[in-house]
Image (cartoon, rainbow, N blue to C red):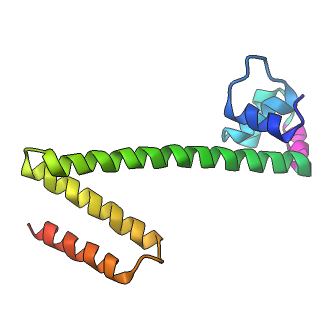
Amino acid sequence: MITTLAARHELAEADSPYPLQGDDQLFQALVSGCHIENAASIAGISVRTAYRRLADPVFKQQLQEARQCLRESILAKLSDAGHDAVGTLWELMQSADDEGVRLRAAKAVLESLRGFHAESPKVETTTRMQVERTQRVIEGA
């Protein structure tokens, strides 16, 4: 059975070449998003035992930290993909032969920028207004 936090994080992030048992199977199933009943079944333990494990503050903390680590990893990958997507839209805006493609790419960039500004209240109001004004011009085209 794996008990250290570092080992549990590794378990949550990678497939182990060794068969997992009990708490480790439960932990991996819960980190991956299984409902407690399904996770207990996967781990080969009773649902009551699974709930007892969740009541253990150390197990619960390790589970929360592993889930947070997984969320951060997913967010980093999505951020990288978003950067690539913006680059693709930029290329389309600059080099697409079809004006409709360039226009849709520009609209997509502006819509993303507007959404980004809505989530980032520190962005200056003038910048937000410029984006909205530019979007109105493009939509009118």
**Outermost residue, bottom direction?**
125
Which sits in the foreground, 40 or 63? 63
Residue drawn at (31%, 47%) of the image: 87
Placement of the C terminus among the 4 image quadrants: bottom left
Q: Is residue 114 shown left or right of residue 90?
A: right
| Magenta residues (range) | 47-54
Task: Using the image, determine if residue 16 lies above or below residue 81.
Answer: above
Q: Quadrant of residue 108?
A: bottom left
Task: Using the image, determine if residue 48 lies above or below residue 44.
Answer: below
In the image, residue 109 lies at what x, y percent? 28, 58
Residue 53 part of the magenta segment: yes
In the image, residue 137 lies at what x, y percent? 14, 72
Which sits in the foreground, 76 or 63? 76
Query: How many labels sit on residues?
Result: 0
For the stretch drawn in magenta, the main secondary structure is helix
| Visible residue check, residue 122 | yes
| Visible residue check, residue 38 | no
Residue drawn at (14%, 45%) of the image: 95
Residue drawn at (40%, 49%) of the image: 82
Residue drawn at (91%, 44%) of the image: 52
